[in-house]
Amino acid sequence: MTLLRAKGAGARTVARHVLRNAAGPIVSTTFTELVDVLLVAVVVIELVFGIPGIGHLLYDGVIDRGLPLLMGTAMTPAVLTVGGTLLQDVVHAALDPRVSQGD
């Protein structure tokens, strides 16, 4: 930032460089936290309001000790998380060309 200012760059150019370098970690952290919060929120909201869905199904599996039901309802968010992590890696590589592409 100091070098850009010394070369006479304006605030917009400095902001572009700062945001470009900060975008990778922000995308990674945001996506990981978003998946965790959404999963917990779905379970809580469905139980509080009595909405039938995967959260309610998961709760019923815990209460009834249904192992196949628990495995299925736990596998769905796990597969979505793996797919989302793959998407996150692709976006991170697009935002930062310095990320290794697997030489």
Image (tube, rainbow, N blue to C red):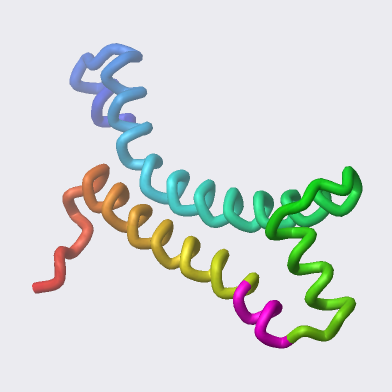
Q: Please tell me which residue lies in front, 95 or 61.
A: 61
Dividing the picture into quadrants, the one containing residue 57 is: bottom right
When the figure is inspected, residue 72 is found, relative to residue 41, above or below; the finding is below
Q: Is residue 6 above or below residue 47?
A: above
Who is closer to the viewer here, 2 or 26? 26
Residue under the point 25% across and 30% down: 3
Magenta range: 67-72
Query: Main SS of the magenta segment?
Result: helix
Residue 4: x and y in percent read 25, 26
Q: Is residue 74 left or right of residue 31?
A: right
Q: Residue 19 magenta-drawn?
A: no
Residue 101: x %, y % from top left = 15, 64
Please say if 10 is above or below 79.
Answer: above
Q: Residue at x 26, y 43 (%)?
A: 95
**Horizontally, is 56 left or right of 71 in the view?**
right
Q: Can you give x and y, in whole percent of width and height, for residue 53 in the image?
A: 71, 54
**Residue at 25 percent of width and 22 percent of height:** 6
Q: Quadrant of the N terminus?
A: top left
Question: In the figure, is residue 80 to the left or right of 24?
Answer: right
Quarter that holds the C terminus: bottom left
Q: Residue at x 77, y 84 (%)?
A: 66
Relative to 70, 61 lies left or right:
right
Closest to the observer: 19 or 57?
A: 57
Q: Where does residue 51 sit, x and y in percent of width and height?
A: 81, 47
Tag count = 0
